[in-house]
Image (cartoon, rainbow, N blue to C red):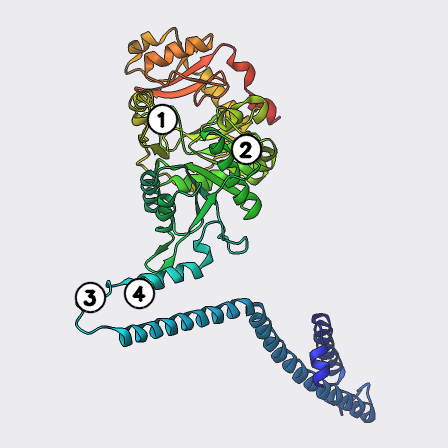
């Protein structure tokens, strides 16, 4: 009987249950054929036939009770087997726990032995004593070594937390990195965004800074340490080359080794808005649904307080924005083979490389930048004129509750075309004052890149072009808030680049 029970598969069990049900159905059918009053006149059964049916019923009842008892034993066995399987599946964890207990016991024994030897050899009244806490520090060091996940690059793929991976890429400044991590921790949710802090080289100060965030109140945090060391085949490279290879290595580690589907790469000198992670979470779906979107960024180069007002508005740009940007594993699959040794940002902005794809950016930035130490006088002037005036969002938006479908290419092109069609065209930036207090959107056209730079200087925008296009522009169209208006600065022939869908024809 035991061999029979243990040999039953899930299919055999289903067969047995089916037989039991069939028996019940048959018994019910037979019972329905027996007259309630066997002696009544006109009964179609003889007394002998009735006794025969009753005996058959009794036989089926006994069989049913026997097989029901057998089914009960099978269920008990399967529950026991499931418990054994769970224990077997966790054997590695149990063994690891026993090993750790053994190491701890050995450590305590050695400490006790050393302490005893020290007391035996202690000179009386020498006036010297050991530094308080020395032994405790050594124990902490051993504990750090035993937890391999606390060491750089030791996290396994199986142990990697789920979610959107946040990669903080640090180059050379521990103080700036600490400010960034403090801002990150202050604003990030408890789960869903594992943080990987990566630094280039073997800077001990930066390593100590990262290590200080891996444990809090005796518990492991959701922050992990990565360390990039150039390979022997990378050759001699300048700082920009190392910067490019560092980012490629971080992306490869998170996508190819740990199998994340989304990764946000963030520089180490930024501050975070409270809703930046809600923004990344909600907008990440756009990377799955619209192949024309290359990345989602929390940074808007035209996000100065004078030009950014609506915290809930998102736009598209075909100029890669940098600083805090998220891509998908599918996009990384396209980029990794040709990732350049130098100029990775310019490479991503190249139209042949990005095949005309865009990034999503917020009107009001979800990150801001701090003034970097060791900057040149030119960098300092640029920071004071433009970057220091970037507005960091202070009004949290629940992007998860919003429909972001308007950002897909055909929807957005149609939307922006309708806004431009309904706007009032002005001849130059100098006449803006004449429209003060009047409602509606305004449109200002430029005929060449040099013309845009002139307009940008008048308005106070960054007078820069990237790959021949204005910063944060979409097909050359720059959208900002100016006073009470929404102002579109558009190139000649802007209409030809937009894929506008006529709603009347699209629904017919």
Circle 4 residues within 10 Å: few <14, some 14–19, many ≥20 = few
Q: Is residue 142 above or below residue 390?
A: below
User: Residue 167, percent across and down?
Assistant: 45, 42
Residue visible at 35% across and 64% down? Answer: 139
- Residue, x 39% and y 46% (percent of image)? 207
Towards the viewer: 102 or 129: 129
Disc 1 vs disc 4: Cβ atoms closer than 8 Å? Answer: no
Q: Is residue 161 above or below residue 44?
A: above
- Where disc 1 sits, the SS reads loop
Residue at (21% x, 66% y) in the render: 129
Q: Which residue is mark 4?
A: 135
Q: Which mark is residue 128?
A: 3
Label located before the other in sequence (2 or 1): 2
Q: Does residue 334 appear to the left or right of 144 in the view shown?
A: right
- State the separation of the CA atoms marked 3 and 1: 63 Å
Q: Front-most of 165 and 16? A: 165
Find the distance from the CA under tag 2 to the CA under tag 1: 39 Å
Residue 176 spot, x, y in % from top left? 33, 38
Quadrant housing residue 71 = bottom right
From what the image shows, is residue 203 above or below residue 351? below
Q: Which mark is residue 303?
A: 1
What is the number of callouts on the image? 4
Disc 2 target residue: 235
Decide which of tag 3 and tag 1 comes sooner along the chain. 3
Of tags 2 and 1, the one toward the viewer is: 2
């Amino acid at each position: 009987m035991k061999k029979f029970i243990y040999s039953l598969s899930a299919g055999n069990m289903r067969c047995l249950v089916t037989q039991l049900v069939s028996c019940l159905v048959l018994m019910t059918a037979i019972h329905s054929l027996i007259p309630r009053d066997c002696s009544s006149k006109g009964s179609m059964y003889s007394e002998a036939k009735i006794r025969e049916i009753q005996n058959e019923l009794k036989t089926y009842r006994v069989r049913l009770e026997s097989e029901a008892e057998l089914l009960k034993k099978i269920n008990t066995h399967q529950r026991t087997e499931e418990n054994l399987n769970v224990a077997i599946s966790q054997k590695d964890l149990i063994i690891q726990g026993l090993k750790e207990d053994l190491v701890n016991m050995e450590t305590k024994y050695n400490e006790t032995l050393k302490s005893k030897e020290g007391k035996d050899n202690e000179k009386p009244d020498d006036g010297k004593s050991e530094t308080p806490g020395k032994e405790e520090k050594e124990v902490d060091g051993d504990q750090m070594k035993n937890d391999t996940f606390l060491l750089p690059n030791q996290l396994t793929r199986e142990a990697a937390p789920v979610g959107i991976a946040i990669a903080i890429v640090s180059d050379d400044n521990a103080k700036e990195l600490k400010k960034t991590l403090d801002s990150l921790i202050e604003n990030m949710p408890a789960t869903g965004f594992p943080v990987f802090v990566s630094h280039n080289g073997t800077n001990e100060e930066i390593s100590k800074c990262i290590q200080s965030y891996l444990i809090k109140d005796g518990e492991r945090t959701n922050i992990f340490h990565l360390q990039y060391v150039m390979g022997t085949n990378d050759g001699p490279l300048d700082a920009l080359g190392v910067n490019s290879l560092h980012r490629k290595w971080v992306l490869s580690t998170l996508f190819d080794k740990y199998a994340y589907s989304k990764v946000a790469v963030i520089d180490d000198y930024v501050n975070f808005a409270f809703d930046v992670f809600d923004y990344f979470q909600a907008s990440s779906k756009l990377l799955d649904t619209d192949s024309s979107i290359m990345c989602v960024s929390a940074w808007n180069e035209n996000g100065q307080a004078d030009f950014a007002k609506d915290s809930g508005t998102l736009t598209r740009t075909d100029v890669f924005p940098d600083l805090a940007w998220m891509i998908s594993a599918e996009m990384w699959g396209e980029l990794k083979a040709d990732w350049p040794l130098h100029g990775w940002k310019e490479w991503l902005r190249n139209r042949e490389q990005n095949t005309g794809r865009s990034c999503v950016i917020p009107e009001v930035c979800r990150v801001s930048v701090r003034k970097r130490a060791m900057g040149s006088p030119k960098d300092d002037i640029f920071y004071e004129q433009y970057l220091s005036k970037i507005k960091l969002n202070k009004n949290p938006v629940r992007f998860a509750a919003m429909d972001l479908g308007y950002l897909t290419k055909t929807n957005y092109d149609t939307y922006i075309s309708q806004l431009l069609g309904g706007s009032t065209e002005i001849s130059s930036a100098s006449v803006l004052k004449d429209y003060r207090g009047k409602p509606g959107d305004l449109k200002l056209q430029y005929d060449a890149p040099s013309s845009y730079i002139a307009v940008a200087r008048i308005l106070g925008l960054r007078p820069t072009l990237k790959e021949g296009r204005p910063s944060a522009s979409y097909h050359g169209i720059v959208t900002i808030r100016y006073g009470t208006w929404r102002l579109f600065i558009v190139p000649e022939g802007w209409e030809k680049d937009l894929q506008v869908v006529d709603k009347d024809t699209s629904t017919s």
